[in-house]
Image: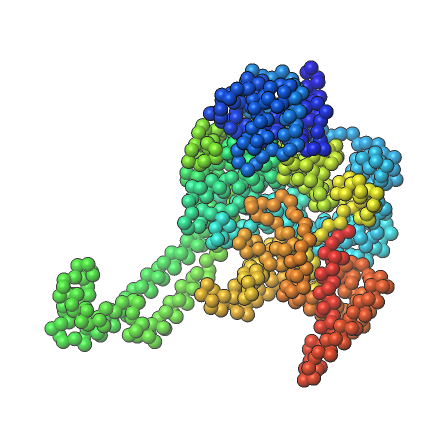
Amino acid sequence: MKNLSLALAILFASWPVLRAAETPGEVLFEPHIRPILKSFCFHCHGEEETVEGKLDLRLARLMVSGGEGGPAIVPGNADKSLLLERIRSGEMPPGEKKLTPEQVNLITRWVAGGAKTARPEPEKPLEGDFTDEERAFWSVQPIRKPAVPAVQHTEQVRSPIDQFLLAVLESKDWDFSEPADRLTLVRRLSFDLHGLPPSPDTVERFVNDPAPDAVERLTDELLASPRYGERWGRHWLDVAGYADSDGYTEADPVRDYAFKYRDYVIRAFNSDKPFDQFIVEQLAGDELVTYPYENLSPDATDKLAATGFLRMAPDGTASGGVDVNAASNEVIAETIKIVSTSMLGMTVGCAQCHNHRYDPITQADYYRFRAVFEPGYNTKAWRAPGSRLISLWSADQRLTAKVLGDAEYKLSEQRGRELNAIVQEVFEREVNKLPEAQRAPARQARATSADKRTPEQQQILKETPSLNVDGGSVYLYEPARIDEFNRRWDERIAQVRSLRPAEDYVSGFTEIPGQVPPTHLFYRGEINQPKQEVTPAELSIVSLTSPVEIAIDDPQVPTTGRRLAYARNLTSGKHPLLSRVMVNRFWMHHFGKGIVATPGDFGYLGERPSHPELLDWLATRFVSDGWQLKRFHRLLLGSTAFQQRSQRRPEIDAADPDNRLLARMPVRRLEAEEIRDSMLSCSGSLSDKMYGKPAPVAVDEVGQVIVGLPTLDLAGGRINQGVSLREDEFRRSIYVQVRRSLPLGMLEPFDMATLSPNCDIRQSSTVAPQALLMMNNSLVVREAEKFADRVRKVAGDNISEQVKFAWVTAFTRPPTERELAGAIAFLTEQTEQVAAKVPADQAGKEPSPAQVALASFCQGLLSANLFLYVD
């Protein structure tokens, strides 16, 4: 019986709520019925302190014994079972969410079949005591390196990856597609690793390279470029929820120093920082730096910048009119979502108010996980965004700033004394205009503070307003003198200020030593209803295979050390989730979909891995190779699977419409940032400037969010007219400011990353606004014109050469004879049509009809599927 139970546990561990196609032969409580009841019923009937109707549905025998209304089920007789009667009538569960017909049918079959269990049930349900099925769920099992399978088509094997994929394909009498041609491969590799089209020189060298290791050498070349970190840094910034603003309210305050985290990420990818170190620094970089954070080395600054990961969640605590208590707790909740979906592939946030409805995560687990991070947030001593900044001044800079501050203060005092002397001089001049008898009383009246003046003194000053001269009004008496005074002193003070070191901060995540706030479980997630205190811990279900001790306050470090202990366990190589989640993400960015198609959810509601053995092989290989991502890229990109054609085969498509078995390379549409960056690259506008403050975004006169400065103030007055950002306007999209309230108009229709709070997977839609944008957007039109100018400079006025150069630049490959003829015909006809519409008095002026036609042609290329998609 014990062996049977274990077999059933493993067999059904991946079935939370069975779909119609997955209906089992024999229906048992633990693998089939319990997940349904857990999702819909346990909250009221078992988990709360007060059990509704005294009916506990967590065990089959408790259903038989029943509650206040009698037995909930009658084994062997579904029609007499009260539970099914309530479910079928729609009375239960309450609310809009109801069981599906398939789920109702499954419960009916179970009851009719005798309400069988997979094993003897415990005496009573225990909080946090998971079932065998939950313990056996695939993603929480220890990662073990499987044997590489043998295959028949050994000639198609370039990598062990191919053997895992081929083994499945061959079981269906399939194999890989033909190898992709060189032009396809060079474009595929360039976009995968750089997010940009390949340069003509790169294309020519690769296409004409006869060496068998040409792909490997091109891969190395692309990985060595700084463009690599910009591309792959963007992927990580998605899951981190990176933004240059706080969000939460319409005010959406700007985060002036968030870019330091973005730059850290790009540098980390370019330097091939081991991914375990990358993770530890983001979770606990501050706990690796000596406190207090002064005279920081570049390495220490990097570690503090890394913790910006924990500052990416929307944060309304700096906005007026906000309940800071509620907003600060929301920051923690959103951060937990970011951490759990990006690193654990688990939707931990679902357990904030009650036990997770699907995954084995209790509400206590959620708050124990929260306790790992609580000391850095501390809602009882909340630090607003501005007070979290860490100064990057060195000791010398601090001293310089102090000396200059003192000097500025002394200058301000001297300025004040000189101004007071001028005021007094003017006052005396005005007093002397009075009769002599009134002069002494007037001087006395002015010398007396306003709240102590007698009625007579008040009357004197009222009748002679010229005596009320002060620092603010003295300009009315001596305009030229005061202008000269202000100019002279402003210059002196400005000179001192100019010597002051520039302000420089990093917005990191830190704890205040000695402050260790308690973490309480909140009743139903209500922040004003705290219950028992909890201590920091890993999720219980994960601790079964990856136990970790997290001290409440580690005496070995100035901070609590909680995050550092957690991060080190997470990256130990023994954690069942992290390496699986990471390699699945990397795979997704190369093959379009992850081996697990839901990269942020490795739980019961997530997809099951298409190739579970391959996933574990990759996870163990990644760890054993030192967590080196560039080495992992080489492994994937060197495979036959990656280098095959994307050509469809109808017989395989019919059986595998989503291409989950990878019998061909999937076609993918460029991401939003790739489209903008590639457009700038084709036109020759793209800047290669790296790092630093982001290029700002603003709303233009027609309401579009553009890269630029605002042109209108709140009152509608024109500001910043004609002010150019110069090079910054044409930087890569990763360097464009990410305002939660102002998504860039060029990117938004193309499924840019959502920030609520992060984006674990981007969608790829095809909708009308995309085509309309490519037809009408001012950036597209402008860059098409620049593209046309570039084409003319290279190809001259020869239409055939213009088409060839533009085609290769946009699509990587030359046009076919048919495409060339069609393009020439289009340009010829378009030029004639434009010329026919030019007024006689405009003839011969720029732009010429040929230029207009060429710009229209270039815009067509930038809007074509050959430009927007990668084979």
- Residue 432 occupies which quadrant of the picture? bottom left
Residue 287 in picture, x, y percent from top left? 53, 38
Residue at 73% in and 79% down: 836
Using the image as rendered, state which of residue 287 and residue 249 is in the foreground. 249
Labels in figure, total: 0
Q: Quadrant of residue 663?
A: top right
- In the image, 191: left or right of 47? right
The answer to whether residue 838 is above or below residue 537 is below
Image quadrant where one finds the N terminus? top right
Identify the image quadrant of residue 804. bottom right
Above or below for 430 versus 525: below
Residue drawn at point x = 44 percent, y = 49 percent: 318
Scheme by which the image is coloured: rainbow
Taking the spot 41% from the left edge, 67% from the top edge, the residue there is: 491
- Whether residue 830 is visible to the viewer of this picture, yes or no, is yes
Out of 35 and 324, give the one closest to the viewer: 35
Decide: is 747 above or below 127. Answer: below
Percent from the top left, x then y, of residue 790?
72, 68
* 810 to the left or right of 355: right
- Give the vertical position of 380 relative to 201 (above or below): above
Residue 838: image location, x then y, percent: 70, 79
